[in-house]
Image (tube, grey):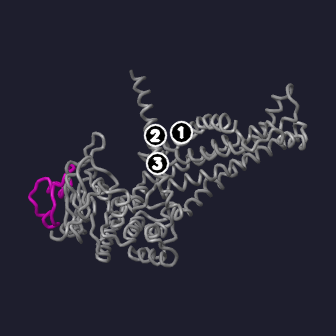
Amino acid sequence: MSGRILIDVRDLWKSFGENHVLRGLSLELFEGETLVVLGPSGCGKSVLLKHIIGLLTPDRGEVLFRGRNVFDMSVRELNKARQHFGMVFQGAALFDSMTVGENIGLPAVEHRGMRGEELEALVEEKLRLVGLEGMSGLRPAEISGGMKKRVALARAIALNPDIVLYDEPTTGLDPIMAEQINELICDTQNKISATSIVVTHDLHSACFIGDRVALVENGTIEFVGSTDELMETEDEGVRNFIARGRANRGPHENRGAGLH
Amino acid sequence: MDFFAKIGQSAINMFAVVGAAGVVFWRALTSLRHLPRSMGLVLEQMQRIGVESLPLVMVTSIFTGAVASVQVSYQLKEYLPKAYLGTAIFKSVVIELGPVLTALVIGGRVGASIAAELGTMRVTEQIDAMEAMAIDPHRYLVMPRMLGALIMLPALTVIADTLGIGGGFVVSNVALDVSGRVFVDGMRTLFYAGDVLGGLIKACVFGLIIALMGCTAGLATRGGAVGVGRAATRAVVASCVLILISDYVLTTLIYGIIFS
């Protein structure tokens, strides 16, 4: 992969008590690419994502965003850097005291001081992008799980961020809805031209969305390369993971790119 | 040995809570510089903490005044003329019963509600989402609650004082054979504005304690629904204990030193 390095994760270590989640993980994200971080549940993918955006601090190691270590930044600098990010959380993490529209508009209200018609137009534009026009007045409790993920995506891209982080965007959804979310992610990538990191344990999603794939096992990167390279690798650990991914999904669902 | 280990652990936990509360307080205090754009949030919290607690405070204070009237009349029966009933009711309500009982019922209602709300936001990653959007939860969630409680507790105490004295007045008239004029004259005898002021100063501190304990317990919540329940319990227990301890300290300071 060529291009400028946007995020450089260097030798990241993190433990929660006796649970050593990250063990010297290193990874590079290039400008404009969609990198899928793949791995079994509990291998530290989400923890990696939370380090990248500075929600967790590591025991050791650094995350460089445009050459600056996120963990050396002051609160003000970190918040400034975070405005370049959008993040879609695993459980959508919508503010349930607000409507869908208020959720999407919150970053614009807080950081751009947007109000009135301008704000309404932005909310409707983002809702249209995720196929939920006219739903801004609903509360998160009144919409389905798939719709919540869409709203979370709309909120994450509200200010057209440079980088979008997706934490298990298809987890907990039925295969048809998962497929729609995958397509939506690709579509969104094309429309806002953001660099993305997608964390998933779903091999099918990884092959569908990703330019490159990084496989995390035992807290380190086991493999990193293109989706084609992933399918053709001779590495036994990686092949085992692919075999498990195929078995879990079932032959009738393995119809995504690279899984024929 | 186990016994001493438990005492030691409790002491460590207590210091950890005090430390966490100190950090939350400091961060809320420093975010006061963003007050102009958070005024809407402060008003919303004033409504939730103050206006919505009004019925509870009204019932509590009316009956407290009524009971105090019966109690004082019974205690004074043989020793002092009933002309002093108004004096005793007024002083006991504005100095002690009004501020403390209002704080204890608000501590139960509002403290638990703040801890449960913030705790749920914590376990559903809503607070992480807020931080990822570069919105400081101490500015957006904690500061408005602290300011709302700081403003509304004295306001509620004024209402509680008025209704408590009113309750005492009615019972004195109806059941204790003390005319309204005698009751009011009793109130005016030994009236000292410092009594009222001291009660309101205490109410301000109690308001801060309730909001701070609720926010600290809520932000520190871990582990799903059970964790949220524990946070609410912790907030109420800590608020009530701290209200009673600080009541002693403040009463000594205000009436023993400043207004003596």
Q: Give the quadrant of the N terminus of chain B.
A: top left
Helix, strand or loop at label 2? It is helix
Residue at x-position 87% and y-position 33%: B82
Image check: B156 left or right of A181? right
| Proximity of marks 1 and 3: CB atoms separated by less than 8 Å | no
The residue wearing badge 1 is B238
The amino acid on which the numbered mark 2 sits, given as a three-letter code, is Val
Residue A228 is inside the magenta segment: yes
Instruction: Give me the disc on residue B24.
Output: 3
Work out whether disc 1 and disc 2 sit on a shared chain: yes
Q: Position of residue B24 (x, y in %)?
A: 46, 48
Task: For label 2, count other residues whose C-alpha is less than 10 Å away and answer few (under 14), some (14-19) or many (20+).
Answer: some
Q: CA distance from mark 1 to mark 3?
A: 15 Å
Q: CA distance from mark 2 to mark 3?
A: 10 Å
Closer to the N terminus: mark 2 or mark 3? 2
Residue A60 position (above or below residue B74) = below
Q: Which residues are magenta?
A: A216-243
